[in-house]
């Protein structure tokens, strides 16, 4: 199987999306978020959005982009490889967003073809709300020729220390799927996951990342609204149930972090979170 770099430039959108309070609260609840402001519909400013919530309204664009680029037949081969989210400002409950996506890079990697997409969300005034550069690795797929090069997340500080643990329940992928409105059968359909070569279903990479963000903010006594940028590479898959170790190094307004499985494999590497 192969992919042509001619897919670079393929785009979809803009699609309209309403960020309603019910969706925001469900996403936070799926992650066990403890900040009461994430559920307080009486706040004049509305409920607080989890920093990773943009992955929810970006998902329909991810699927549409794969369809337009002719990649849907390779869905069982694709894994989330890297993520770079920039929040231009906090989300507001009830606002209407316009979301667009474009393939901006195709790079050869040893395990397969890395396809890089850029997702942009703007508000009713046309002002940017969130921008995500997402790398998806198509395992065992050959890229005919490269086009563009993604920016790697920065190297993580090597003096990371244990900052806590992250408990992943046996049913988290099902709960996250419904609350985030992100349905990918590799996370909840056992037969599909096994047919894709996995021993069982695995947790969404974005769920692992969101759990890490929440744990880091709690450790720093910081709020979701303070998150400006989140970057990472995804590595080892996360089975369910699992207990993950969170390693971190805090300096000024930036935290470097990794998420490690019990066997020492890194589920998340080169993680950084920038606060304002």
Image (tube, helix red, strand yellow):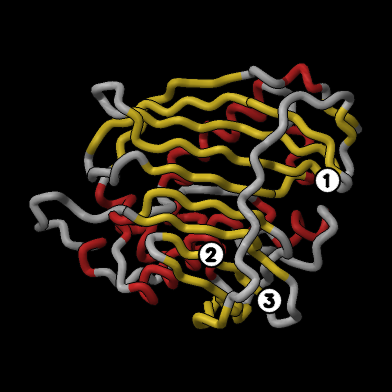
Disc 3 crowd rating (10 Å Cα; few below 14, some 14-19, many 20+) is: some
Label 1 close to label 3 by CB (< 8 Å): no
Judge whether 192 appears above or below 162 on screen: above
Q: Residue at image x 82%, y 22%?
A: 4
Mark 3 vs mark 2, CA separation in Å: 17 Å
Work out whether residue 134 or residue 194 is closer to the camera in this orientation and state it: 134
In what element is the residue under mark 3? loop
Q: Nearer the viewer, mark 3 or mark 2?
A: 2
Q: Residue at image x 32%, y 59%?
A: 224
Residue 74 coordinates in the image, percent (x, y): 78, 37
Mark 2 vs mark 1, CA separation in Å: 28 Å
Give the label on residue 256, or none.
Answer: 2
- In the drawing, does residue 248 fall left or right of residue 222? right
Judge whether 100 appears above or below 218 on screen: above
Please name the residue that numbered disc 1 is placed on: 139
Q: Nearer the viewer, mark 2 or mark 1?
A: 2
Upstream in the sequence, badge 2 or badge 1? 1
Name which quarter of the figure residue 124 lies in. top left
- Quarter of the picture containing the N terminus is top right
Residue 40 coordinates in the image, percent (x, y): 17, 62
Upstream in the sequence, badge 1 or badge 3? 1
Residue 10 coordinates in the image, percent (x, y): 64, 18
Label 2 close to label 1 by CB (< 8 Å): no
Give the label on residue 261, or none.
Answer: 3
């Amino acid at each position: 199987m192969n992919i042509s770099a001619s897919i670079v430039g393929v785009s979809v959108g803009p699609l309209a999306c309403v960020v309603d309070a019910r969706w925001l609260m469900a996403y936070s609840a799926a992650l066990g978020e403890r900040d009461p402001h994430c559920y307080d519909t009486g706040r004049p400013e509305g409920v607080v959005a989890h920093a990773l919530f943009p992955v929810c309204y970006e998902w329909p664009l991810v699927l549409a982009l794969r369809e337009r680029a002719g990649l849907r037949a390779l869905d069982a081969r694709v894994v989330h490889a890297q993520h770079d989210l920039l929040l231009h400002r906090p989300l507001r409950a009830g606002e209407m967003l316009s979301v667009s996506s474009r393939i901006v890079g195709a790079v050869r990697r040893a395990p397969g073809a890395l396809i890089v997409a850029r997702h942009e969300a703007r508000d009713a005034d046309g002002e940017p709300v969130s921008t995500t550069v997402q790398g998806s690795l198509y395992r065992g797929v050959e890229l005919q020729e490269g086009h563009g090069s993604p920016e790697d997340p920065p190297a993580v500080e090597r003096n990371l220390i244990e900052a806590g643990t992250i408990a992943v329940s046996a049913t988290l992928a099902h709960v996250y799927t419904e609350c985030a409105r992100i349905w990918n059968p590799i996370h909840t359909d056992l037969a599909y996951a096994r047919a894709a070569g996995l021993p069982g279903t695995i947790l969404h990479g974005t769920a692992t990342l969101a759990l890490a963000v929440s744990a880091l903010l709690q450790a720093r006594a910081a709020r979701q609204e303070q998150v400006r940028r989140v970057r990472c590479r995804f590595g080892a898959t996360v089975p369910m149930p699992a207990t993950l170790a969170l390693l971190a190094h805090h300096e000024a307004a930036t935290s470097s972090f990794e998420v490690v499985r019990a066997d020492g494999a890194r589920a998340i590497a080169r993680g950084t979170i920038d606060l304002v």
